[in-house]
Image: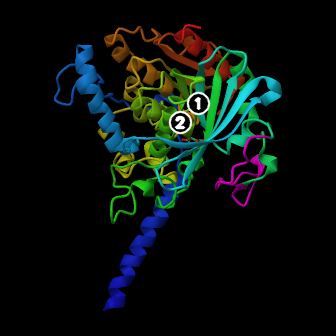
Amino acid sequence: MRIKRFFPIAILLLMAHSSLSLAAEKFEPNYDESKVPEYTLPDPLVLSNGEKVTDAKTWKEVRRPEILNLFAEEVYGKTPEAPDLLRYQVIETSDEALDGKAIRKQVRIFFTQDKAEPKMDLLVYLPKESENPVPLMIGLNFYGNHTIHSDPAIILSDSWMRKNEDKGIVDNRATEDSRGASADRWAVDMILDRGYGLATAYYGDIDPDFDDGFQNGIQPLFYKEGQNKPAPDEWGSIGAWAYGLSRAMDYFEQDEDINENQVAVMGHSRLGKTSLWAGARDERFAIVISNDSGCGGAALSRRRFGETVARINNVFPHWFCDNFNKYNDNESALPVDQHMLIALIAPRPAYVASAVDDRWADPKGEFLSVVHAEPVYQLLGEPGFGATEIPEVDHPIMDTLGYHIRTGGHNVTDFDWKAYLDFADKHFGR
Ligand code: GTR
């Protein structure tokens, strides 16, 4: 009897499992604009009780918290409160970094008052010639701080890394070959020459980017008694990475060489999704920049162009909260769409960047998010940016909101950095 009952269930489970992975393998992205489904976006300026938001006070006190909460409960997961006190240790400094042009600081940030692990190593370069305190760009990196520049004094990360031969990763660890391996994505000289500081940390220091049921990374530090994974409305990896960015911000508030009121948070791809969520939650970030962030970032989910909600949740089950799975092939049920994530940044300046060949990230969907966030900026007395059509390739548009689509593919280039620095200059009055 037992065996008879067991078999069909096992077979059913097996079938369900293989059809899932089959669905992931067989996913065919839509790249045909005429096949984008018709959709209606939720209105950022209508309360969940149906009333219209017509003044800044109602936006700030009612609608903004409502939307923030919806993103937390349904998309990225709720995040713990900030610690009362940031524990950090300055590990290394130099006033003669990068041929004497920069000040370098390497700061170890801890996530609790007592535990040593996990820890996040923050690398900070500040321009030496500028008057302090300086404005600063912060972005997480994919393969360790030592990959952003060949500076031999950068501490070589000993954290777990995703496989990548080109980045000198052997057995999931960085090697000396990793030094400077991502330097082409980090315009360190340009940033310093323009009078900005640059800070970065390895995202895997906060939560290693693989699905281990949240046993590593910072989530376990916050489990209640008996809890061994986040609840369906609690943070996944993107939530954790964004939390790490906020802890870096805690540090900037304590560093007298940094102007904590002029910090721009920037991220690429999955880390662009992260910079948007960090900037939406934490209003201390004065400017928020998304580089090719795509699905779950700046792109509208309802367009289903390129990567979709179902696809991203199947392939990266640890990025979002479990509740986000409710919207797999069911985007119209989402109480939000990604234009509302940009709206949460208002009235602070936000910049979204796309690339022509990065269709997977849906450049048009990224542009439309900015367009549909604009009414919130206008309600708060900011001009937004006035564009209704995607601009010419390689022609950034910038007002309080900014956007460009550049030549090339999924990457961060000097063109992107130049636009972000121009945008920051404009808003920081430089
Ligand atoms: C892709 C993923 C994208 C983007 C990218 C990245 O595989 O589908 O959403 O996040 O990875 O982060 O490089």
Q: Residues within 10 Å of mark 1 (few under 14, many from 20)?
A: many
Prevailing secondary structure of the magenta residues: loop
Q: Residues within 10 Å of mark 2 (few under 14, many from 20)?
A: many
Question: Residue 191 or 422: which is nearer the viewer?
Answer: 191
Left or right: 76 as drawn, with respect to 258? left
- Figure label count: 2
**Which residue type carries mark 2?**
Ala
Query: Sequence-wise, which precedes: disc 1 or disc 2?
Result: 1
Tell me the element at label 2: helix
**Which residue type carries mark 1?**
Ile
Answer whether labels 1 and 2 touch (C-beta < 8 Å).
Answer: yes
Q: Is residue 420 covered in magenta?
A: no
Please identify the quadrant where the N terminus is shown. bottom left
Left or right: 50 as drawn, with respect to 429? left
Chain part drawn in magenta: 153-173
Picture layout, residue 12 above or below residue 297: below
Tell me the residue at 39%/34% (across/down). 302
Disc 1 target residue: 138
Q: Is residue 156 covered in magenta?
A: yes
Quote the CA–CA distance across marks 1 and 2.
Answer: 9 Å
Q: Position of residue 167 (x, y in %)?
A: 75, 47
Disc 2 target residue: 248
Picture layout, residue 231 above or below residue 426: below
Q: Quadrant of ligand 1?
A: top right
Residue 332's image quarter? top left
Residue 393's image quarter? top right
Q: Position of residue 81 (x, y in %)?
A: 36, 42
